[in-house]
Every structure is written in C-alpha cells, then in structure tokens.
Image (spheres, grey):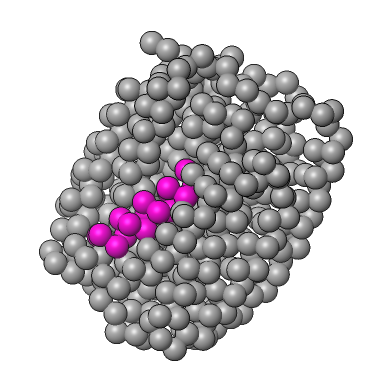
Amino acid sequence: MTTLALPATERRPLIPILVALSAAHLLNDLLQSMIPALYPLIKENFRLDFGQIGLITLAFQVTSSLLQPLLGWLTDKRPWPYAMVAGMGATLLGLLTLAFATSYLLVLLAAALVGLGSAVFHPEATRMARHAAAGRQGLAQGLFQVGGHAGYAIGPLLAAAIVVPRGQSSLAWFSIVVLVAMVLMSWTASRYSAFRRAQPKGQGDETAGHGLSRGRVLFAMTILILLLVSKNGYNAAFTSYYTFYLMTRFEVTVQLSQIMLFLYLAVSTAGVIIGGMIGDRIGRDRVIWLSIVGSLPFALMLPHADLFWTGVLSVIISFVMASAFSAILIYAIDLVPHRVGLVGGLFYGLSFGLAGLAAAVLGALADSIGIVEVFRITAWLPALGLLTFLLPTSRRG
C-alpha cells in the first residue's frame, strides 16, 4: 500500500502564535455558535418551522463555504494575515443585524454576514497554524481546533444565560467580544508577519513528498470529502436540532437542552487535542478511522436511550468524533502542501457547506417524519468512515 509521509519536526512549534490563534478561533466560533443556540428563541419570535430554521443554517454555511476556497486561493498567492481582522468586521455587522432583526429576511442576512466573517478567518488562520507548527501538525491543528470547539461550546451556554432570558436584542452586548477578538487578531497577525520576515527566503515553503500520482491524489481527496459528509452530516443533527430533540422526546426546558448541547460541544475540546497528538504518532488515516467508525455503535444506541444515557452517549460520541476534521484537513494539506490556503479554504468551506445543506435537509425531514426519527436515520452516517480503508497509509517521514 502506498504510504503518505508526514513532515518531520525540524524546530519547536511557535506556541505563543498557536495559542493566540486558538484564542482567536475561540472568540470567532463563540460568536458563530450564538446563531444555532438561539434557534428556539428565533423560531418562537418569527413563528418559523424546522425547514426555515434549516435555511438560517444554510445561509451561514453557504456564504462561508463558497468564499473560503476563493479566499484561500488568493492568499496562497499573496498572504494577508490581517484578513482575520477584516473578517471580524463582517461578523460584527451580522451580530448587530441579528440582534435588531425585525423580519426573517434580516435574520438570513445576519447569518450570511457572520458566514462571510468565517470565510475570511479560516483559510489564513490555517496557513498561520501550519507554518507555526514546525512539523507537529497534529499538535498545531489540535491547539487551533480546541479554540474553535471551546467557542462553540461556550456560545450556547452564554446564549442560555444571557440572551434567552433578556431577549434577542441583548445579543448586541457581544459586540464587546468582537472588539476583543479584533485586537487579539491584530496582535497575532503582527507577530506572525514578523516571524515570516525573519525567515530566509524560501524557508517554510513545502513540496509534496508522497510520490502519489495526480489521479491518486484526486481519489484520496474524493474519499476525504465523503468522510466529511459522514462526519458533518451527523454533527449537523446535533448542532442544529439536538435541543429540539431533547425538548420533543423528553420535554426538557430550553435552558436544560442548551446545557446538554454545551456538554456535547465542550467535551470535544479534549478529543481534538488528544486526537491531534495521537495523529502525529500513528498517522492521520488511523485517527480518521477511530474518530468516525468508533462513534458508530454509540450513535446507534442514542435514539433508544433515556435522558440520562442520552447525555452520556452524546458526550462519548462528541469525544470520539472530535478529531476527525483536523485529521482530514491535515491529511489533505499533506497531499498538496504548497496550497495550504486553497486546501484549508476548500475543506473548511466544504465542512460548513455540507453542514448547512445537511441542516436544511434534516429540517425538512423533521417537519415530515419528526425530529426523533431523524436522529434514528442519521445514526448510520458514521458507517461511511469505513471508506478510510481506501486512503493511502500515512507514516512519519
């Protein structure tokens, strides 16, 4: 079987830059996660059905997914570390629009603006994390992804504690978070720019060392995309509809359902960093296999569990599946390491776009057959992780 070499470590990772990127990722994704966390409130305020809720997710995800590959391609040609700051400006505008929205169309516009901010942030931040990794790509992406996972976990908790009791307009208070994020991103961009200027010309540039033909690379990319369908399709059921599932099946309050969503999202922070470090040792393909297929038995049990075991199983699923995306992303970048921005933008864009499409489809399906039945059907999606066997085996080089 063809093996895919992993970059060897030549120097120590730039931990201050990686930590700052992780913190920026936390703030960026915290703001993004406010949107699905407020779905019950928005649904009630605007009298929406599940299909319309799914379209809100689609507005965010499609805006983000369409722009990320293009922006990644552009920044491959001309890196722009300060792009993150500009993107956060779009997020601020979207946040304020959502806070004072008076119609469903304004809600969709707000979601699209927040998606634009995400599209600008992720490709350049991925490149910065890659260059600061010093060959420890699993560790670097683990640290970077921890911020995103933590932000997605904290957002719903803050929504439950602040926005739900005080109303939609109180979302404007989170403009303070945006301003803090912009300051942090400016500092990170300046440090990274200084680091790159200090490097000899050409140092840090990567070339593919796997020896795979163009056809094999395209085949591997196709498999990775199908694995994203599996992971993101199932995760979309949780991020968009887990609160509704809990309220429908167990008749819990909005606050309790959001706390349980927080637990699902929070535990992934541990899974992503542990999975990243393991991937540096055993290879990305094995981590992908363990992350996706390993969650299958728990996913199949969840629709038949009581409230307590639903919480336990959801935490296990989140922990096991957490490292799948970072492993898929690093594997893809290792295939074409000279196109970090394009590949990062493509896979983040696909990740968001697939999640948005899945949310819209699952929302329409929930209106037709019920949200509980949707969770029974989506439980089979992790079985697509078996496709990992078709990937070239990764090894340390």
Q: Please, which residue is most extreme toward the left here?
A: 369
Does the segment drawn in magenta span residue 206? no
Position of 76 relative to 377 (above/below)? above
Position of 102 relative to 232 (above/below)? below
* Residue 247 shows in this picture: no
Query: In terms of image quadrants, where is residue 128?
Result: top right
Q: Please, which residue is most extreme toward the top here?
A: 1
Q: Which residue is drawn at 76% across and 63% down?
A: 183
Q: Which of 172 and 89 lies nearest the eye of the viewer?
A: 89
Q: Position of residue 196 (x, y in %)?
A: 80, 38
* Residue 84 shows in this picture: yes
Position of 292 relative to 219 (above/below)? below
Q: Please, which residue is most extreme toward the right here?
A: 198
Q: Which of 391 and 214 lies nearest the eye of the viewer?
A: 214
Q: Residue at x 45, y 35 (%)?
A: 328
Q: Residue at x 33, y 79 (%)?
A: 43
Q: Position of residue 205 (x, y in %)?
A: 70, 28
Instruction: Judge from the rendering whether residue 39 lies leftward or rightward of residue 160; answer left or right.
Output: left
Count of picture labels: 0
Q: Position of residue 135 (x, y in %)?
A: 65, 26
Q: In which quarter of the image is the N terminus?
A: top left
Q: Residue at x 59, y 75 (%)?
A: 93
Q: Where is residue 243 in the image (x, y as percent from the top left)?
A: 32, 66
Q: Give the range drawn in magenta.
A: 347-362
Q: Quadrant of the C terminus?
A: top right
Name the main secondary structure of what is drawn in magenta.
helix
Instruction: Judge from the rendering whether residue 366 lies leftward or rightward of residue 280; answer left or right.
Output: left
